[in-house]
Amino acid sequence: MKNTYKAVQVTRPGLVETVEKELPEPGPGEVLIKVEACGICGADAGVIEGLEKGINYPRVPGHEVVGTLYKTAEPLPAWLKPGQRVGVGRLGGHCNVCEQCRLGHFNLCQNQPVTGSSRDGGYAEYMLARVTGLVAIPDDLSSVDAAPLLCAGIATFNALKKSCAEAGATVVIQGMGGLGHLALQYARKMGFRVIAVGRGDDIADEVMALGAHHYVDIRKDDAVEAIKALGGAQVILSTITESAAVSALLPALTPQGQLMVVGVGKEPLTASPGLMIGRELSVKGAITGTAIELEKALKFSLLADVRARIEQRPLAQAKEAYDRMRSGQATFRMVLTVNHQ
C-alpha cells in the first residue's frame, strides 16, 4: 500500500505547487477516496487567491471530486461498498447534531466542512471525506462528466427546483458561463421557456444549441426591454457575481416573479421597494444541496442528457487549468484527471 501521494496545494495565496504528502488515515465517520477527477470552479479562487477569509494554509483546493472508496475506519453504511465510485461536493458532510440537521436541513448544517476550503479537497490523488457528504455516482455517468455536476450542476438544478416556476413558465438564465450553460440545459429539460442572457454574439449559436428559446446579447440589446418584449419572466436565475447587473434585471420580472441567486457577488443587491411591493416580487438564494439532492441531480442529468461542456487537463497541469478558467477562455468547465500509477 502506498505511503505518500501527490497533491496540488496552495502554500500561501498565489503560490500553487505540487507536493508529496503522507497518505492520511480516515478517522471516525470518514473515508479515504482515491480521486479520479476533480472539477475546477470559480469558487476555488477563494483559496488560491486568498479571497476567502479564515483559510488555514497550506490547503488543497477542489470541491467537485469523484473517485473510489479506498479505505475506511468503520463499517460502511448499507448503501456503500468498498471500491464504489463516489463524489463529494462543496458541502463536505453534515454533522447530524446541530439544530439545522435536527430539522432535516442538512445543506444548512452549521458544523460541516467546506471541501477545498476548511479541509483539503480534490486537487490530489487521494482525499479524506465525511461519509455523510458522499454521493453515489451512477454507473453510466463518467467521473469526468459527473465532477462539475457536483457544484455547478446541483447549484443550478436545485435553484430551479426551489423556484416558483411551473412547467411552461418563462425563465431567464443570466450569465452563460460554467453555471449558466448547465442552468440553461436544466431549465429547458424541466419544461420552461428559456431566455438566455449573455455577453457577445460569438456564443449565440452554442447557447441556442444548448436549448435556449431566445438569446439576449447585452452588448447589443437592453436586456430588460428585450425580456419585456418577450412577455417578461416569472423567474430569473442569476449565475453571475456582478451584483449591479443582477439588480438591474429585476424590472424584467412579471408580477409575483422571483429572482433566484446562485452567483456570489461581493457587493449588495439593490432593489426598489416600490417595484418589489407593487409587483410582489421576491429574491431567494439557493445553496448547492445535500448528498441525496446531488444524487437526484445526477440521475436527472442522465435521464435528460444534461452535460457540462468540458476541457480536461491532468492533475500536474492544475495551475495552468485554473488560470485558463479564470481567464474566461475555457469551454465552460475545466476538469482535472488523475492517472494513478
Image (spheres, grey):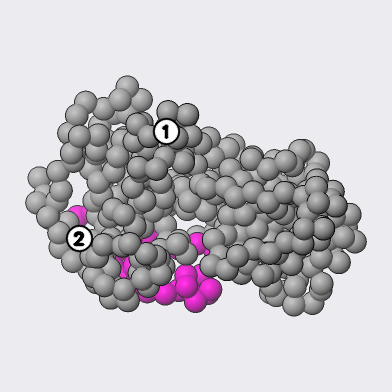
Callout count? 2
Q: Position of residue 186 (x, y in %)?
A: 64, 46
Q: Residue at x 36, y 71 (%)?
A: 50
In the image, is residue 66 part of the stretch drawn in magenta?
no
Q: Could you tell me the amino acid type at mark 2? A: Lys
Residue 74 visible, this angle: yes
Of labels 1 and 2, earlier in sequence is 2
Nearer-the-camera pick, 95 or 124: 95
Is 83 left, or right, of 177 in this rendering? left
Identified at 64% across, 40% down, the residue is 162
Q: Residue at x 84, y 50 (%)?
A: 279
Q: CA distance from mark 1 to mark 2?
A: 38 Å
Q: Quadrant of the N terminus?
A: top left
Q: Residues within 10 Å of mark 1 (few under 14, many from 20)?
A: few
Residue linked to disc 2: 6
Task: Give the left or right position of residue 239, taking residue 2 as reference.
Answer: right
Q: Residues within 10 Å of mark 2 (few under 14, many from 20)?
A: some
Q: Amino acid at mark 1?
A: Glu
Residue 272 placement, left or right of 66: right
Viewer-nearest of labels 1 and 2?
1
Q: Is residue 324 magenta?
A: yes
Quarter of the picture holding the C terminus = bottom left
In magenta, the rendered stretch is 313-341
Q: Compared with residue 309, is residue 166 higher up or lower down, i.e. above or below?
A: above
| Image position, residue 314 (x, y; %) | 33, 64
Give the label on residue 99, or none. Answer: 1
